[in-house]
Amino acid sequence: MTLTLLGIESSCDDTAAAVVRGTDVLASVVYGQTALHADFGGVVPEIAARAHAEKLDLCIEEALQKSGLTLPELDGIAVTAGPGLIGGVLSGVMCAKGLSAATGLPLIGVNHLAGHALTPRLTDQVPYPYLMLLVSGGHCQFLIAESHDTYQRIGGTIDDAPGEAFDKTARILGLPQPGGPSVEKAAAAGNAKRFKLPRPLLNQPGCDMSFSGLKTAILRARDSVVAEKGGLTPQDQADLCAGFQSAVTDVLIEKTRRAMQAYLALNPEKRSFAIAGGVAANGAIRDGLMQVCAELDTDFVAPPLNLCTDNAAMIAYAGIEMMQAGHRDDLTLSARPRWPLDQRAAPMLGSGKKGAKA
């Protein structure tokens, strides 16, 4: 039986709803909040949560209209239940609970990271196991996806995620948010070799990464230029962006090469490497990772850009795989700010009262 699910996503600053039938995306709607946070240099959790509460019903209604379906024609409702900004996650979970209670439709709580990790199966029907690089504003992990609910983390960032580093670099250099596209655009006109920037942990074994020191290096390089010239020219910005982007790319390429060796040691029947998350939209990073895959005779899978960033189609599809495996939630489903995919691995960023961060 082919299942049709409504997906709801509100973990950060995008309010999203989608209707997916099997692997067909019937409708996908995303309401962004960039303008709401533009004056603050980043996402303000309280503003984001309020915007989700105001837009969720409109977003869901539009997705249903575009799909040509009504709620009674669906098989279930999948919603991001974590990890993320707790106010936003809570908005989505409460909305999904209300719809489930009113319609009697099954409720499925989805890990946001699982949504990203399963996107290659939605778009390309990639068979298990496959190697996944989840690289976004809040996360950076190498995962071997063994099934819809079994993941082996073989490396990740021990501090800032690449997307966060891109945003902070843009802020340091006076470029608009979101930082990823701004830095990539400026880097196109820059000289990546002008500034000598570090490649953190590149000489250390394993697949773990660190981007906090690179961000600090950009700050110091900027301050040095400002002290010398009294300010930054557009070319200075471009060169700093090019150097930063090159450093991030070098780290991701080398760590991917190592992660691939661990994955290929499993002798998968079909060798596949996939990327997802907002940073996966960066052209230089994609090109570098494609080259690694070509060298190792492994399929490279990159979902369309609109499915790399936060969206509800990936949540609906993850819910479909979970329902097919017999998973259901009830109205006790809770919002979780922290929810690591690999429950067996030691926390990368430490733990608190609410559990492992990642």
Image (spheres, helix red, strand yellow):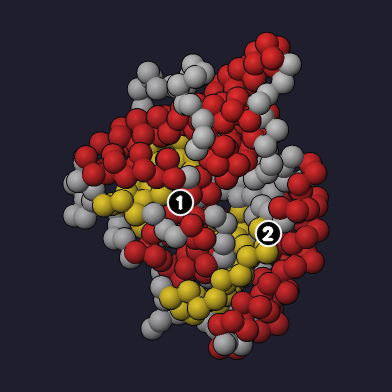
Q: Is residue 254 above or below residue 274?
A: above
Q: Amino acid at mark 2?
A: Gly
Q: What count of labels does the image hold?
A: 2
Q: What residue would you read off at disc 1? A: 276
Q: Is residue 156 above or below residue 97?
A: above
Task: Answer with mark 2 or mark 1, whichever residue precedes in sequence.
Answer: 2
Instruction: Using the image as rendered, state which of residue 175 and residue 209 is in the foreground.
Output: 175
Identified at 71% across, 12% down, the residue is 227
Q: Position of residue 123 (x, y in %)?
A: 39, 65
| Mark 2 element type | strand
How far is disc 2 from disc 1 in space, using C-alphas? 19 Å
- At x 67%, y 37%, the residue is 175
Q: Nearer the viewer, residue 12 or 33?
A: 33
Residue 32 tag number: 2
Whole-percent x, y for residue 150 in the image: 39, 53
Element type where label 1 sits in the image: strand
Q: Quadrant of the C terminus?
A: top right
Question: Which label number is shown at residue 207?
Answer: none
